Image (cartoon, grey):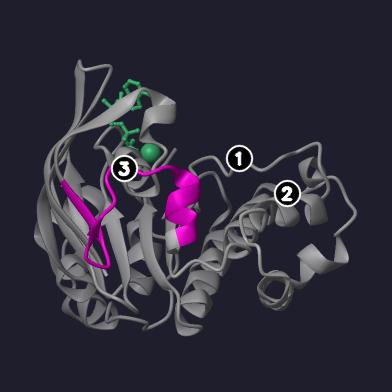
Amino acid sequence: MLQIRNLQVSYGGAVLALRSVSLDVRQDAVVAVLGSNGAGKTTLLRSIAGTLSDHGGAVDHGAIEFEGVNTAGRSPSAMAAAGVVLVPEGRRIFTSLTVAENLRAGGFGVRDRARRTTALRRVHELFPLLHDRADQRAGLLSGGQQQMLAIGRALMASPRLLLIDEPSLGLAPQMVGRIGEVIDEIHTQGTTVLLIEQNATMALGVASHAFVLTVGAVTLQGSAAELAADQAVRELYLGGAPKPEQAAQATPASGLAPTPALRRWTA
Ligand SMILES: Nc1ncnc2c1ncn2[C@@H]1O[C@H](COP(=O)(O)OP(=O)(O)O)[C@@H](O)[C@H]1O
Ligand SMILES: [Mg+2]
């Protein structure tokens, strides 16, 4: 569905954020990208979603193909029309607007009214709270609820590929588990997901395949179970030595393990 080849991205022609990234996302998969701060994870999603130029970045070379078409340099609205929608880092909901207005904003690019109605029904089924609090100001929601709203807003565009940038950041462990369940549900409903996470346990619990990004390059990739069992991944991101029984549990869609003590990534 999505193929990225030798992607190099820089900001202001000076800061090299991605050196040479190649990555595939198959239709109907949940793919996770792990990596520490500054690795280039957000830049990768911006490149795919078309928001790079808003941040002073540009693709130097390489290809981004969505369903066989090179989409590098396309605008976010063109990407949304093609079926690719980003849930940005830090949620970026409109805090002074109501929950309903935020959701409506997510469906702006969708001309077909029936499609908007179907999308809204899906969002309300997934997040009943967004229905109950429709008229409340979005800024009054908790962090976890705001993340649900940000995901709901993206779903209003009926994406086929949903890009999610660090949804669990700053959330309590229980809420992180809930986000994982939501991603699982979205995937089960037929939406392909590319998930960026600092919470490796959550990400590897929900993903089928994962990549590790280190200073702008892919340094590891494999099935989620392989990565969960990998010594380097365990040491860097899961905070411990491999335990065979735990590795065995980390099969795709095996449900979500409790949040571990993350050494490098715990805020
Ligand atoms: N708008 C920007 N302008 C200049 N440099 C940026 C910008 N955004 C990110 N960078 C730089 O690009 C690199 C990758 O950042 P980013 O993609 O945000 O990483 P991550 O999401 O993995 O933390 C970092 O060195 C960061 O400082
Ligand atoms: Mg980031």
Asked which quadrant contains residue 195, the reply is bottom left
Quadrant including the C terminus: top left
Residue of label 1: 92
Residue at 25% x, 46% y is: 35
Question: Is any part of residue 154 visible from this angle?
Answer: yes
Quick check: marks 2 and 1 in contact, CB under 8 Å?
no
How crowded pointer 2 is (Cα within 10 Å; few <14, some 14-19, many 20+) is rated as few
Residue at 52% x, 74% y is: 181
Q: What span is colored magenta in the figure? A: 63-81
Instruction: Check residue 71 for magenta coloring.
Output: yes
> Label 2 CB, ligand 2: below 8 Å?
no
Quick check: marks 3 and 1 in contact, CB under 8 Å?
no
Q: Quadrant of ligand 2?
A: top left
Q: Is residue 158 left or right of residue 8?
A: right
Residue of label 2: 142
What amino acid type is highlighted by mark number 3?
Ser
Vertical order, 36 against 113 (above or below)? above
Identify the disc placed on residue 47.
Answer: 3
What amino acid type is highlighted by mark number 2?
Ser
How crowded pointer 1 is (Cα within 10 Å; few <14, some 14-19, many 20+) is rated as few
Mark sitting earlier along the chain (3/1): 3
How crowded pointer 3 is (Cα within 10 Å; few <14, some 14-19, many 20+) is rated as many
Q: Is residue 21 left or right of residue 38?
A: left
Quick check: marks 3 and 2 in contact, CB under 8 Å?
no
Front one among 145 and 10: 10
Mark sitting earlier along the chain (3/2): 3
Instruction: Check residue 132 for magenta coloring.
Output: no
Residue at 54% x, 44% y is: 170
Foreground mark, 2 or 1? 1
Foreground mark, 3 or 2? 3
Pinpoint residue 132: horizontal percent, then vertical percent: 86, 66
Tell me the CA gap for discs 2 and 1: 14 Å
